[in-house]
Amino acid sequence: METGTVSMWVSPAWGELTITSAFKYPISMGNSQLAFTMHKSGSLQRICFFYAGIALVKDGAALWDAGDWLHLVGTWDNSGAALDAHFYINGTLEDSDTTSTPTTPTATDIYVGSQSNTAFNEQFFEGIVRNFKIWDTQFDADQVSTLNSQESI
């Protein structure tokens, strides 16, 4: 899919991880072709949106606690000469990137709740994923904000 938006609500069952820097995948498709990851390393928490090998990142000391609900949205347009990707948490733009060497993902299967590579069995998402949706159009910031305020968990 060259142009799209993916949206979901997630509630991690963990704030602290016993495995240092273990990644948890609310969704994934291929090897970083389309994915959200959440992990903690020391005092740093990180949420990432991956599309076509590009990582958009939000780092912080207290991004979530166990049981919190987060609305994650990733958007992309890979139809032109450059990839245009955006990552939102709770309706707020957290990171964006434009690269002049976009690649088109080739994987077709989307895995909800795990990394798509079965060699990484410890990377199942521990928590709840709700209202997972994907569109074949790139939402703008206003549409993401509206989506965030209109959806309920």
Image (cartoon, rainbow, N blue to C red):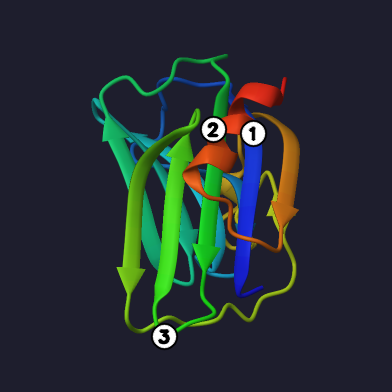
Tell whether 46 sits left or right of 114.
left
Mark closer to the chain start, 3 or 1: 3
Give the residue at x 46% y 40%.
Answer: 88
Q: What numbered label is drawn on residue 147? A: 1
Q: CA distance from mark 3 to mark 1?
A: 28 Å
Between 146 and 130, which is closer to the camera in this rendering? 146
- Marks 2 and 1, how far apart at CA: 5 Å
User: What secondary structure is found at the residue carrying circle 2?
Assistant: helix
Image quarter where the C terminus lies is top right
Question: Which quarter of the figure has residue 109?
Answer: bottom right
Let me know if residue 21 appears in the view: yes
Return the x and y of residue 124 as percentages of the image width and height: 62, 43
Query: Is 40 or 47 nearer to us in this picture?
Result: 47
Viewer can see residue 29: no
Q: Which residue is mark 3?
A: 81
Amino acid type indicated by mark 1:
Leu
- Report x, y in % for residue 148: 60, 29
Q: Residue 14, percent across and down? A: 51, 21
In the rendered view, does 54 fall on the left or right side of 139?
A: left
Q: Which mark sits nearer the N-terminus, 2 or 3?
A: 3
- Local packing at callout 1 (Cα closer than 10 Å; few below 14, some 14-19, many 20+) is some
Question: Does the CB distance between marks 2 and 1 fall below 8 Å?
Answer: yes
**Vertical placement of residue 94 versus 13, above or below:** below
